[in-house]
Image: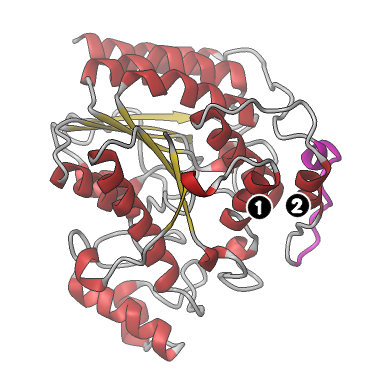
């Protein structure tokens, strides 16, 4: 039976009024799932908060201490800011700057334990912070819970792991931590020319990394071609014991921090196709900065993972959850009516551009070599 790991720490927790992560995300997914009767107590677990000592499985002890101290004091020195990138525009000081990411890390490490003891699939929407580095915050990510999850899965006895990342931004922190590890396959699709400006097509990370940068306007048909031509063949060839899918929702068309054009149906299709390729599955969140599209995407993925049928129109309680969201400031327009009344987007199909076909062919040839 698939399990969902969440926490109330995400309700009202914000990076600040000027930050893209001022919007609610995980709490929206929890509220939508409960409004749809998709989150019974038997399938819900409260995420523990990882202890500082546990986080040193990958992160430097000095950095963890600095992060913990910054939350307690509500400020950082110039030295700490320069050394650990805390208190910057991207990685600001805020009230839960240690406890919130430590909860995400605790959630994925609990997921590793559950998967090792018989649970077949776990969704941790608070996970997926894939930019964090051992000794510093990076790209809104204070910790790197995907790396911690993979290390915990290894310690739990999983010998072969496939990590697939469909966030709009390249998983630079995960590649930094796991490049060259023969037991772990890393596959990333991400928008080309976008921060962190890593993950080039020819970057194989020492042999275990498959990077596919895609152009702006990347549509559902193109994602299907990438799924069938790159993602599934590489994952199947790796023969994983467990798959970790980072499903950052910022590749959806309405997201303000990318210029990709996927519908959330493309995410569902990726999940459905990957799920049969390993006996265990860990589904993470990640990026996503439009509160309506993030909540709908991750809720649709939980429905898919847990075998629930997605209705064509949302019942009134679920619509009320979405209608109650806002951007939390700024001048962005209100959502289109469909983002309130439905869970699944309309398909966003289109041509598969020649440059995408060429990149798929190059990566397919690499696999055959």
Residue under the image location 18 percent in, 10 percent down: 369
Residue under the image location 52 percent in, 12 percent down: 354
| Percent coordinates x, y for residue 57 in the rendering | 17, 60
The disc at residue 168 is none
Q: Is residue 334 within the magenta segment?
A: yes
| Percent coordinates x, y for residue 191 in the rendering | 50, 36
| Percent coordinates x, y for residue 203 in the rendering | 27, 33
**Disc 2/disc 1 C-alpha distance (Å):** 7 Å
Labelled pair 2, 1 in contact (Cβ < 8 Å) = yes
Which residue is under mark 2? 321
Which of the 4 image quadrants contains residue 66? bottom left
The total of numbered circles placed on residues is 2
**How many residues crowd around disc 1 within 10 Å: few (fewer than 14), some, or many (20 or more)?**
many
State the residue in front, 341 or 210: 341
Residue 262 shows up from this direction? no
Left or right side of 292 for 298: left
Residue under the image location 24 percent in, 40 percent down: 117
The disc at residue 31 is 1
State the residue in front, 290 or 275: 275
Residue 153 shows up from this direction? yes
């Amino acid at each position: 039976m698939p399990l969902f790991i969440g926490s109330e720490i995400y309700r009202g927790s914000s990076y600040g009024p000027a930050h893209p992560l001022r919007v609610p995300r995980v709490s929206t997914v929890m509220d939508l799932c409960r409004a749809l009767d998709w989150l019974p107590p038997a399938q819900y677990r409260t995420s523990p908060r990882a202890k500082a000592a546990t986080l040193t499985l990958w992160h430097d002890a000095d950095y963890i201490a600095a992060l913990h101290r910054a939350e307690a004091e509500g400020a950082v020195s110039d030295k700490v800011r320069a050394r650990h990138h805390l208190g910057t525009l991207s990685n600001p000081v805020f009230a839960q700057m240690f406890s919130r990411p430590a909860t995400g890390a605790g959630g994925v490490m609990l997921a590793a334990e559950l998967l090792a003891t018989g649970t077949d699939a776990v969704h941790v929407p608070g996970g997926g912070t894939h930019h964090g580095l051992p000794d510093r915050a990076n790209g809104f990510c204070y910790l790197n819970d995907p790396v911690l999850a993979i290390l915990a899965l290894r310690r739990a006895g999983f010998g072969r792991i496939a990590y697939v990342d469909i966030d709009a931004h390249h998983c630079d922190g995960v590649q930094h931590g796991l490049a060259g590890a023969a037991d772990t396959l890393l596959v990333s699709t991400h928008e080309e020319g976008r921060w962190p400006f890593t993950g080039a097509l020819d970057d194989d990370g020492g042999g275990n990394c498959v990077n596919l940068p895609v152009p702006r306007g990347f549509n559902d048909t193109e994602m299907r071609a990438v799924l069938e031509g790159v993602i599934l063949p590489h994952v199947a060839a790796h023969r994983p014991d467990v798959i970790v899918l980072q499903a950052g929702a910022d590749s959806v068309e309405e997201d303000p921090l990318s210029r990709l054009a996927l519908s959330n149906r493309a995410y569902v299709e990726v999940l459905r196709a990957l799920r049969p390729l390993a006996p265990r599955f860990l589904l993470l969140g990640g990026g996503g900065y439009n509160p309506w599209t993030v909540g709908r995407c991750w809720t649709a993925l939980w429905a898919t993972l847990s075998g629930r049928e997605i209705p064509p129109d949302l019942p009134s309680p679920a619509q009320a959850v979405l209608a109650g969201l806002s951007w939390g400031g700024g001048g962005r327009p209100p959502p289109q009516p469909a983002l309130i009344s439905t869970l699944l987007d309309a398909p966003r199909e289109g041509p598969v551009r020649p440059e995408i076909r060429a990149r798929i062919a190059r990566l397919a040839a690499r696999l055959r070599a």
